[in-house]
Image (cartoon, rainbow, N blue to C red):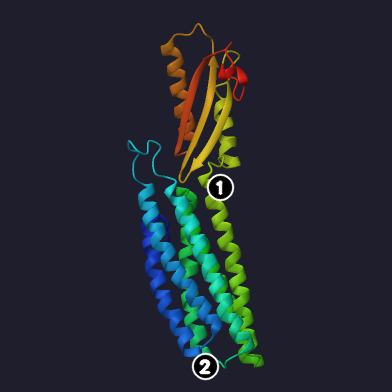
């Protein structure tokens, strides 16, 4: 399959590919650990199991997120992707702690490595597979705004850096004979993936708390509204939020009170269509108000 064809795949297809690649890398890295008895390669193999679990869970959540809105979920199921990102972060943190625990024992009881050349070769091949898949995933995640796909891609990149660190560490052990370097590299790898896991969990929590849209998206919204502003038309009380692949904006549009309802509704439709064309996946909700009427949010007068 050509690169353009890969980049045209849906998030679901890429996560299915991630499951397959995770299975392949588990076989390769477990084999590398088995023939070398390197705790660094064991850490690398453990992260591949996390890759597999994350890819499966991400695939389930992306599938749920694509479901249309229904009576119980009138705004859709898009936030399901944040559960995927948070779950992946939690798995990464767990794997990092397990690696630190395993490597800590080896610092005080280092073991000689066996068949280092074959072990490194298997690790490099698996890293190349992960790196290629992550590169494709980042491109598709940017287009589809899939946080689950982006989370899986970031994890794969972390896996690549993990493998690179392990390879360097094992090569250093082979050259210097310092067996404790193997465990030290494993701990360094664990700290790196621990940082990535915490970052994913933080991003997931922000999405679940209705974080505002990205600055570039907000700028596009303001630019679109500016094209409709007039001496008799203005916009205020604009608020935004993002939910998985979807974006939402709520605002007030003020116009002359003498306008007919049909004329006001027609203009609102034009503004909504312009906003949704400027920002794909955006849902715009516009409340119509006469020019001389103001809304007072968080004001005691609104409670009377």
Of 207 and 279, the residue lying toward us: 207
Q: Is residue 223 above or below residue 52?
A: above
Secondary structure found at label 2: loop
Q: Is residue 252 left or right of residue 68?
A: right
Q: Is residue 131 left or right of residue 297?
A: left
Q: Is residue 238 above or below residue 203?
A: above
Circle number at residue 114: 2
Identify the residue shown where x is 46% and y is 87%: 34
Residue 238 picture quarter:
top right
Circle number at residue 206: 1
Residue 183 picture quarter:
bottom right
Secondary structure found at label 1: helix
Residue furthest to the front: 304
Quadrant of image for the N terminus: bottom left
Q: Is residue 38 left or right of residue 5?
A: right
Q: Which mark is first along the chain, 2 or 1? A: 2
Circle number at residue 61: none
State which mark lies toward you, 1 or 2: 1
Residue 40 visible from this viewpoint: yes
Q: Is residue 52 above or below residue 253?
A: below
Q: Residues within 10 Å of mark 1 (few under 14, many from 20)?
A: few
Residue 5 visible from this viewpoint: no
Q: Residues within 10 Å of mark 2 (few under 14, many from 20)?
A: some
Q: State yes or no: discs 1 and 2 in contact (Cβ < 8 Å).
A: no
| Residue 109 horizontal/vertical position (percent) | 61, 90
Report how far apart the C-alphas of labels 1 and 2 lie in the structure: 46 Å
Identify the residue shown where x is 58% and y is 81%: 103
| Residue 173 horizontal/vertical position (percent) | 62, 89
Identify the residue shown where x is 63% and y is 74%: 188
| Residue 149 horizontal/vertical position (percent) | 46, 56
Q: Is residue 127 above or below residue 18?
A: below
| Residue 108 horizontal/vertical position (percent) | 64, 88
């Amino acid at each position: 399959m050509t690169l353009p064809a890969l980049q045209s795949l849906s998030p679901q297809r890429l996560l299915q590919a991630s499951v397959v690649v995770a299975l392949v890398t588990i076989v390769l890295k477990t084999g590398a650990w088995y023939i070398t008895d390197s705790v660094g390669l064991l850490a690398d193999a453990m992260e591949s199991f996390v890759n597999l679990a994350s890819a499966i869970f991400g695939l389930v959540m992306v599938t749920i997120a694509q479901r249309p809105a229904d009576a119980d979920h009138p705004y859709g199921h898009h936030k399901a992707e944040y559960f995927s990102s948070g779950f992946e972060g939690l798995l990464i943190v767990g794997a990092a702690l397990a690696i630190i625990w395993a490597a800590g024992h080896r610092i005080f009881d280092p073991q000689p490595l066996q068949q280092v050349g074959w072990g490194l070769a298997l690790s490099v091949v698996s890293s190349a597979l992960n790196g290629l898949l992550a590169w494709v995933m980042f491109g598709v995640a940017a287009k589809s705004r899939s946080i689950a796909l982006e989370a899986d891609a970031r994890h794969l990149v972390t896996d690549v850096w993990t493998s690179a660190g392990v390879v360097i560490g094992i090569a250093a052990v082979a050259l210097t004979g310092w067996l404790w370097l193997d465990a030290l590299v494993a701990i360094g790898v664990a700290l790196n993936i621990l940082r990535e896991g915490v970052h994913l969990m933080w991003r997931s929590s922000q999405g679940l708390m209705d974080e505002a849209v990205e600055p570039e998206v907000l700028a596009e919204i303001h630019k679109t509204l500016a094209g409709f502003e007039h001496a008799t038309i203005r916009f205020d009380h604009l608020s935004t939020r993002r939910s998985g692949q979807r974006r939402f904006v709520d605002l007030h549009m003020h116009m002359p009170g003498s306008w007919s309802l049909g004329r006001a509704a027609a203009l609102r439709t034009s503004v909504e269509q312009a906003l949704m064309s400027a920002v794909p996946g955006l849902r715009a909700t516009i409340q119509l108000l006469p020019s001389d009427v103001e809304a007072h949010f968080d004001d005691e007068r609104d409670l009377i």
